[in-house]
Amino acid sequence: MTLKPATALAHPNIAFIKYWGNRDNDLRLPSNSSISMNLDGLFTRTTVTFSASFKTDSLRIGKKSIPGSGLGRVNDILDLVRELAGISEPAEVVSENNFPSSAGVASSAAAFAALALAASHAAGVTLTEHELSRLARRGSGSACRSIPGGFVEWHAGIEEADSFATSIAPPEHWDLVDCVAIVSAVRKKTGSTEGHAVAATSPLQAARVADAPRRLDLVRQAVLERDFDTLATVAELDSDMMHAIMMTSNPGLFYWQPASITIMESVRDWRASGIPVFYTVDAGPNIHVICPQQQAQSVERRVRELPGVNDVLVANSGGPAQIVS
Ligand code: PMV
């Protein structure tokens, strides 16, 4: 039997309060809750077809067929969906990003959000937003935040069933812009899955996690009240704290490059001179430079002029993951 194919689209997201470290690595239950903004304009589009005529699951990303051994986490999500739907048909997954994967922007959040939505739809199961967010989380923790729209909080939860993300404000609530300064497109040596697994080896992780509820409250309130100064101060602190964990874990993970530090210093100088702007950095050398729409053009221009910046991607706050056909 061939079930009807489904195509879903999802955006990546940028966290203002970061997720780093799990209480349960297999279930991807995080050590702390996190808050992010979806990135409009950048997306992954994924089509899933279940059919008894396929011998095995297959995956194509762009023009590239991924060999069976590379299917790992995609297989896991397909298995979870088959279990929910009570079907056994293999699936064909065809996925593409509208941003070059060589841009070095984390695409796993958008990828697993689009996969969870397309696969469940194609298997004929209707999931609530909470259930979809939980399913996406199993592929990549941050993917659970790309299911709801706009500004999103992932509630760490106590157990598997209550660890999912919800929207705290729609995209139009605040016209923030993310100018992503691309410093390097080289694939990172240590991915986030391995990084989460060693977070607890840093003697600083316990302090970061213990202080997370305070930072979350400040950032949630700052988003709701469109309080840029508080968001800027706390989001930068949170990013710096996560990188301190990375650097002091065993093995130590150093994601910044010299150009990354130049950009962060410039952003701090610009803010000190009165420009509303801040940075936040994921598990890589590229710097997300966030500002209100009104300053976006001039901030983008300034970022482009900095040494070591190869390109700048610009994204407004984006909506939820959606079925597009
Ligand atoms: O979802 P993962 O396993 O790729 O982890 C994402 C971790 C960071 O991007 C560094 C932080 C975050 O909260 O997005």
Image (cartoon, rainbow, N blue to C red):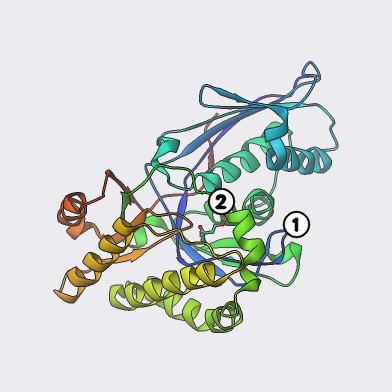
User: In the rendered structure, which amino acid carries the disc numbered 1?
Assistant: Asp
Residue ID at (36%, 57%): 257
Rendered position, 291 above or below 107: below
Label at residue 26: 1
* Residue 300 spot, x, y in % from top left: 21, 52
* Residue 177 spot, x, y in % from top left: 30, 56
Outermost residue to the front = 251
Location of ligand 1 given as a quarter of the image: bottom right
* Residue 79 spot, x, y in % from top left: 79, 39
Q: Quadrant of residue 144?
A: bottom right
Residue ID at (40%, 42%): 185
Q: How many marks?
A: 2
- Looking at the image, which is closer to me, 193 or 74? 193
Determine the secondary structure under disc 1: loop
Would residue 193 be visible to someone looking at this image? yes
Would residue 224 be visible to someone looking at this image? no
Q: Quadrant of residue 114?
A: top right
Is label 2 within 8 A of ligand 1 (CB to nearest ligand atom)? no
Residue ID at (18%, 59%): 295
Q: Relative to 201, is 254 on the left or the right?
A: left
In the picture, which quadrant includes the C terminus? top right
Rendered position, 197 above or below 83: below
Rendered position, 237 above or below 38: below
Q: CA distance from mark 2 to mark 1?
A: 20 Å
Rendered position, 255 above or below 240: above
Determine the secondary structure under disc 2: loop
Q: Which residue is mark 2?
A: 147
User: In the rendered structure, which amino acid carries the disc numbered 2?
Assistant: Ile
Of labels 2 and 1, the one closer to you: 1
Q: Residues within 10 Å of mark 1 (few under 14, many from 20)?
A: few
Q: Relative to 169, is 278 on the left or the right?
A: left
